[in-house]
Image (spheres, coloured by chain):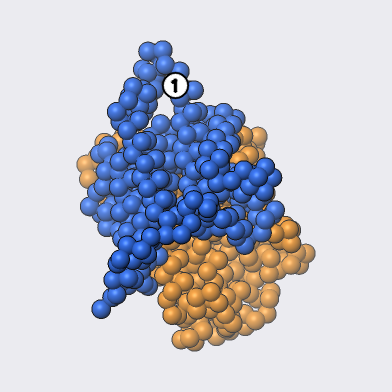
Chain colours: A blue, B orange
């Protein structure tokens, strides 16, 4: 018999992981939808977000709350520069070149940070407002962890709302379908592409800041995570916004439960699910059938 | 290379069926390559050369898929690594002679290739890259947790043994020429495959899949055969590598290894016959000389990726071939 305490504990860990899967796969999906590029540098950009928060605290004394804004903006700008100087040149080529380029960028960024900070984690404290926790009777809920789940949900759903329900989102979806036609209607598609990439990268950086107090700040924190997120994106269906949110949280929880019932499989369960989903639906659970 | 998947409707045109004649400049390049490789161990550290040769075979097998079918697999480390484990286990625990151990590793990689290939071959482009990567991660975690792989330690002190009961592989030079023979055999298999009618169909699928389908070919069959062949030869490379270095470890199944073989092929020139060999030698030399500098190696590798993708997409051999006006 599995004690309820452990069950809820793992459920919470699953939700936390799911929160990060959802935010990261959402960014990947938004980028893929418009740019048709799988952003292999996403893990590195997530790590950069955490480091920007760390630097802000060390150099400027700016704490957690300002970092939630600063990190996405700074890393997003990095993304904008990357798109303007490099990715832009690859749009007329096979999409695989975009993957290879961002893979190279990830190697360079992670290598540089590792050179400077080694492979061990740097501690980053949660803000005083979010320390402590609540006793819910059946389990203990640390405030910060609850905050991460709520924050991720809000960010994901807002993004979904903007893309699916607003005018700006309509432009974006139209440009995904047919960029030439949208440009002909007088919308600056190249600028939209640049900003979309910046936004997706900013989401990764925001996830990085949220992760910093939980997982510490580590140059390789995104390196292996991104591979799992790729699997999540494939299960949800590349380019599907709601798909990445739902599968992100769902798979986090599934992974958490696997840790309780069959710990040996906890690392592979997501990949096994991916294989099964692909057998039934090659475009993923929520993917468009093309 | 026989065509197992027969075109269902139309017979292929005669020109495609016979394939082009042996190009003299490629024969010349092959002779130069063999001459260099035969004389090299007397000037360069042989163990380094053996490592480069194993990776050259790995890259050639990978190039069969990327360069000639246009499929980017980001999980080829699974085949290299699992074949390494299989042959190391056979040689050490079961006491098999090296030729059988290598054969066993090769067959295991081929079997794995059939399973993964059957599941992934319907997807294309970025999907294919992502899905192969995920399968390779499954293999990685399996290798990390399974009993026989030795986890973080790997399988160490694998005996090199005696080849066919005659050649004692503990001698470095004997080992070198065996590795060279394995490499050349694999290289010629790839060469034959891409210059056969089968290879012509692969290129047709790469260029225009709907048209190949309309001519009566079944692209998925051809792609699957190419995938399995590529996996099998990657397995040969991994199995040989495990015998040479007497070690099978997690490094060979990790996804960074999959990235490395992409780098070799890209740098050398994808879709060229000699490119992957040149790329493998360049990347392995780079690793050799930058080994002391720690993560600078990753940075340099990343920069090579960026430069290759932005300005140098033909790769070293591809550019050379363009200058000479002949495909190498």
Q: Where, by quadrant of the figure, is residue A136 drawn?
A: bottom left
Query: Residue at the spot x=47%, y=47% of the render?
Result: A207
Viewed as shown, does residue B242 lie left or right of B90?
A: right
Taking depth in this image into account, of A214 and A98 the one nearest to the observer is: A214
Q: Count numbered badges in the picture.
A: 1
In this rendering, the answer to whether A3 lies above or below A199 is below
Q: Nearer the viewer, residue A175 or A148?
A: A148
The quadrant holding residue A84 is top right
Q: Nearer the viewer, residue A288 or B192?
A: A288
Image: B35 above or below A46? below
Q: Do we see residue B146 in this rendering? A: yes
Which quadrant, please, contains the C terminus of chain A? top left
Q: Quadrant of the N terminus of chain A?
A: bottom left
CA neighbours of label 1 inside 10 A, class few (<14), some (14 to 19), many (20+)? many
* Image x and y of residue B210, in percent: 30, 36
B35 relative to B273 in the view: left or right: right
Residue B38: percent from left, percent from top: 68, 64
The answer for which chain carries disc 1 is A
**Front-lying residue, A149 or A135:** A135
The picture places residue A77, in percent across and down from the top left corner, at: 57, 33
The residue depicted at 35 percent of the width and 30 percent of the height is A162
For residue B326, say whether it is visible.
no
Q: Residue at x 59, y 46 (%)?
A: A63
Quickly name the residue at label 1: A189
Along the horizontal axis of the image, is B53 left or right of A249?
Answer: right
State the residue at coordinates (45%, 63%). B78
Q: Secondary structure at mark 1?
A: helix
Q: Looking at the picture, how far across and down is residue A50, in whole percent?
A: 56, 49
């Amino acid at each position: 018999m599995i004690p309820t305490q452990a069950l809820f504990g793992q459920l919470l860990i699953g939700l936390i992981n799911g929160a990060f899967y959802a935010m990261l796969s959402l960014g990947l999906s938004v980028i893929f939808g418009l740019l048709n590029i799988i952003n292999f540098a996403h893990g590195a950009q997530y790590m950069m977000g955490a480091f920007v928060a760390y630097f802000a605290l060390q150099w400027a004394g700016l704490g957690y709350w300002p970092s939630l804004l600063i990190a996405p903006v700074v890393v997003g700008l990095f993304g904008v520069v990357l798109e303007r100087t490099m990715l832009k040149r690859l749009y007329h080529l096979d999409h695989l070149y975009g993957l290879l380029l961002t893979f190279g960028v990830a190697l360079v960024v992670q290598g540089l940070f590792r050179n400077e900070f080694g492979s061990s984690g740097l501690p980053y404290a949660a803000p005083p407002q979010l320390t402590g926790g609540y006793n819910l009777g059946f389990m203990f809920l640390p405030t910060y962890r609850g905050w991460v789940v709520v924050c991720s949900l809000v960010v994901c759903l807002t993004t979904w709302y903007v893309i699916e329900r607003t005018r700006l989102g309509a432009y974006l979806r139209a440009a995904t379908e047919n960029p030439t036609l949208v440009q002909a209607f007088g919308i600056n598609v190249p600028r939209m592409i640049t900003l979309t990439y910046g936004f997706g990268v900013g989401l990764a950086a925001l996830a990085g800041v949220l992760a910093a107090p939980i997982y510490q700040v580590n140059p390789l924190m995104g390196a292996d995570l991104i591979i799992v997120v790729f699997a999540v994106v494939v299960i949800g269906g590349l380019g599907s916004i709601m798909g990445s949110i739902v599968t992100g949280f769902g798979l986090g929880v599934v992974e958490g439960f696997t840790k309780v019932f069959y710990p040996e499989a906890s690392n592979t369960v997501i990949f096994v699910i991916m294989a099964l989903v692909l057998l039934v639906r090659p475009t993923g659970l929520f993917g468009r059938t093309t | 290379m026989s065509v197992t998947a027969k075109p269902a409707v139309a017979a292929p045109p005669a020109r495609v069926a016979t394939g082009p004649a042996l190009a003299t400049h490629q024969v010349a390049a092959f002779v130069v390559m063999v001459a260099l490789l035969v004389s090299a161990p007397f000037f360069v550290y042989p163990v380094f050369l053996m490592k480069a040769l194993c990776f050259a075979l790995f890259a050639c097998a990978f190039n069969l898929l990327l360069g000639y079918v246009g499929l980017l697999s980001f999980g080829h480390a699974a085949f290299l690594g699992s074949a390494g484990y299989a042959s190391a286990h056979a040689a050490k625990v079961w006491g098999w002679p090296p030729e059988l151990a290598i054969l066993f590793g090769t067959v295991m990689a081929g079997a794995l290739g059939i399973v993964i290939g059957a599941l992934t071959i319907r997807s294309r482009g970025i999907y294919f890259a992502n899905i192969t990567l995920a399968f390779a991660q499954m293999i990685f975690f399996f290798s990390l947790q399974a009993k026989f792989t030795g986890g973080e330690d790997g399988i160490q002190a694998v005996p090199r043994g005696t080849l066919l009961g005659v050649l004692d592989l503990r001698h470095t030079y004997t080992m070198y020429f065996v590795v060279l023979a394995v490499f050349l055999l694999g290289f010629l298999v790839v060469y034959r495959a891409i210059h056969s009618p089968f290879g012509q169909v692969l290129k047709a699928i790469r260029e225009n899949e709907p048209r190949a389908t309309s001519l009566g070919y079944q692209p998925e069959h051809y792609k699957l055969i190419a995938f399995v062949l590529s996996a099998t030869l990657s397995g040969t490379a991994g199995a040989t590598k495990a015998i040479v270095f007497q070690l099978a470890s997690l490094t060979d199944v990790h996804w960074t290894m999959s990235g490395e073989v992409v780098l070799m092929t890209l740098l050398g020139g994808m879709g060229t016959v000699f490119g992957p060999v040149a790329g493998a030698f360049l990347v392995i030399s780079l690793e050799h000389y930058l080994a002391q500098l720690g993560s600078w190696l990753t940075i340099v590798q990343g920069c090579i990726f960026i430069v290759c993708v932005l300005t140098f997409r033909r790769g070293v051999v591809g550019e050379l071939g363009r200058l000479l006006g002949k495909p190498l």
